[in-house]
Image (cartoon, helix red, strand yellow):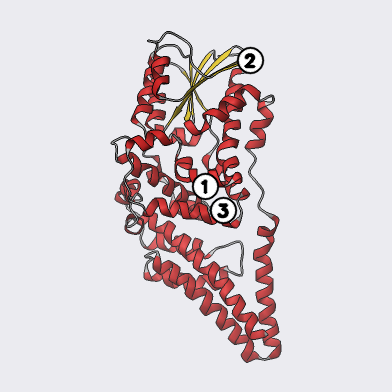
Amino acid sequence: MNDSISSTGTPDDPLQQVARNNPVRTVERDGVEYTLLGTAHVSRASAEAVAALLDSGHFDTVALELCPGRYQAMLNPDAWKRMDLFQIVRSGKAGLVAANLALSAYQRRIAEQFGIEPGAEMKTGIEKAQQHNLRLLCIDRDVGLTLRRVRHRLSFWEKANLLTGMMASLLSRERIDEDEIEQLKQGDLLESTFAEFADRSRHLYESLIDERDRYMAAKLLLAADKPTARPRRVLAVVGAGHLEGLARYLSELDRPAGEQQRLEESPPPARWSRWLPWIITAVVLAGFAIGFSRSPELGWNLVKTWVLVNGSLSAVGALLAGGHPLTILSAFLAAPLTSLNPAVGAGMVTALVETTLRKPTVEDFDRLRDDVTRLKGWWTNRVSRVFLVFFLSNLGSAAGTWVAGFSIAHQLA
């Protein structure tokens, strides 16, 4: 097993030329040569480097930092226009889709400054693999699973920092020099948005970067372990933030199958998060019972406090999201009830009502990727506004639960 930092060959070969301006690592293991090219996903130079290496004829396999879902999205870029908002909301995936939109918007905003599509080097890899009949491997972990594992490991304050980073990426209109983009080389929409938090948070770094280094190394080693179509010379195109870790794990990882299986496990919800909503429901209902046992007037005052505070704050959230008047009314009516039923959130009700009343048009889906790069666009586009209604009415209901709960406790004291 050999890990060579510099590439081999004559000074005029493509690998040497690419290595002058791009981070490159070469790892040899079990008869397979892995050339790791570090890229920035909004870099024109990165796409050109991928094209030069795959046109050289040196490689029989190209491995891309893509999960199967992102790969299919690149093959069918208009598929997202057919997403079923009803199904997304009902299945509880509205938050994940909204997060992906926010992350993509940040990367797209930077990429548009330089006239290059986000992930151009990945698209180049796909095109060149087809052109030269090369084996293509998608080695990254599903982005939804990565976000779930990130969320599971972060503390409350780390999650708050993460949310702050997403909001800052949407609010900032600062232009970034292309030289700075080349220097960052963080390489994917997750890292480019949250790099500074990965530096500060060990848990975020482990889930967002280190785990994926190990996962991609395991995928590469498993591909090389197959008796048929065994690769000999692999070009792995990854974000430069993964370069050192991937090179190390390619050399050190002993049981890739077990490692892949472990890293694909969806984290179970924290025990307290499963029980807390039911505990809150039990406490509130107990408060009502105590109030009515003292006097009907006190009992009804407690119920009125719960309905007015919870419903009003959720309605304010729907109002801030630009929801339809009937959506705002549905937030007021639904929140006091959904807050006592952990299986259903106020945001699910309001998002479904908003989708029904203001059904997104084909034009909304056509403009979605561009609209979410501007803060105002989240409110003017009917698709993204559904996610705002979902998020802000849920946030208002959550705040209302605590405010009303403390008010009830105070009245009972």
Q: Name the foreground residue: 112 vs 94.
A: 112
Few, some or many residues within 10 Å of mark 1 (<14, 14–19, 20+): some
What residue lies at 34% left-to-right and 35% top-to-bottom? 179
Q: Earlier in the sequence, mark 3 or mark 1?
A: 3
Q: Which mark is residue 158?
A: 3
Q: Where 228 falls versus 382 (above or below)? A: above
Is 183 on the left or on the right of 30, as rendered?
left
The quadrant of the picture occupied by the N terminus is top right
Per the image, the residue denoted by label 2 is 1
Q: Where 27 falls versus 93 (above or below)? A: above
What residue lies at 45% left-to-right and 45% top-to-bottom? 193
Q: Is label 3 in contact with label 2 (beta carbons under 8 Å)?
A: no
Q: Is label 3 in contact with label 1 (beta carbons under 8 Å)?
A: yes
* CA–CA distance in space, label 2 to label 1: 34 Å
What residue lies at 66% left-to-right and 27% top-to-bottom? 257
Q: Quadrant of residue 223?
A: top right
Q: Where 149 falls versus 163 (above or below)? A: above
Residue 162, x across and y down, in percent: 51, 52
Residue 72, x across and y down, in percent: 45, 34
Q: Name the foreground residue: 107 vs 266.
A: 107
Q: What's the amino acid at mark 3?
A: Glu
Q: Is label 2 in contact with label 1 (beta carbons under 8 Å)?
A: no
Is 31 on the left or on the right of 80, as rendered?
right
Q: What's the amino acid at mark 2?
A: Met
Q: What's the amino acid at mark 1?
A: Phe
The quadrant of the picture occupied by the C terminus is bottom right
Q: Earlier in the sequence, mark 3 or mark 2?
A: 2
Per the image, the residue denoted by label 1 is 197
